[in-house]
Amino acid sequence: MTLTDTHCHLDYNKFDPDRADVIQRANDSGLIRMLVPGLHHRSSREAVQLAESNPSVYAAVGFHPTDLGEFSEGTFQEVKELASHPKVVAIGEIGIDYYWVKDDDKRAIQREILKQQLAFAKEMDKPVIIHMREEKDAWFGDASVDLLTILEEWKNGLQGTLAERPGVLHSFNGTLETAQKALALNFYIGVTGPVTYKNAEEKRNIIKQLPITKLLIETDSPFLSPVPVRGKRNEPVFVHHIADKIAEIHSKSPAEIASITTANAARLFAWGD
Ligand SMILES: [Zn+2]
């Protein structure tokens, strides 16, 4: 079985004691690739360093919407330089977060910096990893509306293969309608641990209606541990539990889901078969 974890924060200090073992465990269980996204310039640099020293690790670079206190001309320049590294396959994670940021002016800054990073992704011809969170964790609201408006405008200006693989809505927590709008823009949908939670019937129902050729599986380690390891530190090897759940939802075998989502990730991030 070959699997891919397209979103794991292996740079977090929670992995300091055993990072090499975490990566080894993942490799031993069939994970051929792991993607570490950046949150700001420092974590982007760490993601690139991890990718340099581990053959199965790849990196993305960018500024997370709740880390914009780190954003400046200088730090953006640093991220731009990191983006030309051969193992940087995407710009991210970038996006909109109205859960932690309530102030209108600060939300406007998020949208402005998102647009700047999208323009940079276009320039680099790399897809984007999008974070989106609504106020009070609703499934639909201003964050979905604002994000789709910005992504649509950006996507319409893309040419060549990037228009076919513009990015992923990571750890998707929106409505079916939002997912369908994103799919119409050729975006992929990232599925994380909460799909395994007992009370997540509605989420599973949405996933069931999405084409498996557009799904990615991601742990978002060290967060969002899936059942049956909920409460423990999450790590890439647990991506198996998410694959198993999607297999159940789509009536496929876990091996089929593993190979389909691995192929999906390879198409999006263009890192080989
Ligand atoms: Zn993340």
Image: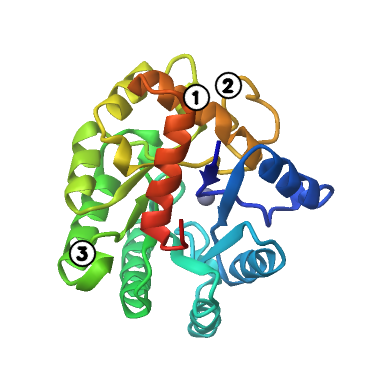
Q: Earlier in the sequence, mark 2 or mark 3?
A: 3
Label at residue 155? 3
Front residue of this view, candidates 272 and 138: 272
Residue 196 appears in the picture as rendered: yes
Say what amino acid the circle numbered 2 marks.
Val
Colouring? rainbow
Front residue of this view, candidates 258 and 176: 258
Q: Residue at x 53, y 45 (%)?
A: 4
Q: Residue at x 56, y 63 (%)?
A: 59
Q: Is residue 148 above or below residue 124?
A: above
Say what amino acid the circle numbered 1 marks.
Asp
Query: Mark 2 Cα within 10 Å, few/some/many (few <14, many 20+)?
Result: some
SS at circle 3: helix
Residue pointed to by mark 1: 244
Q: Is residue 26 left or right of residue 242?
A: right
Q: CA distance from mark 3 to mark 1?
A: 32 Å
Q: CA distance from mark 1 to mark 2?
A: 11 Å
Q: Is residue 217 left or right of residue 118?
A: right
Q: Earlier in the sequence, mark 1 or mark 2?
A: 2
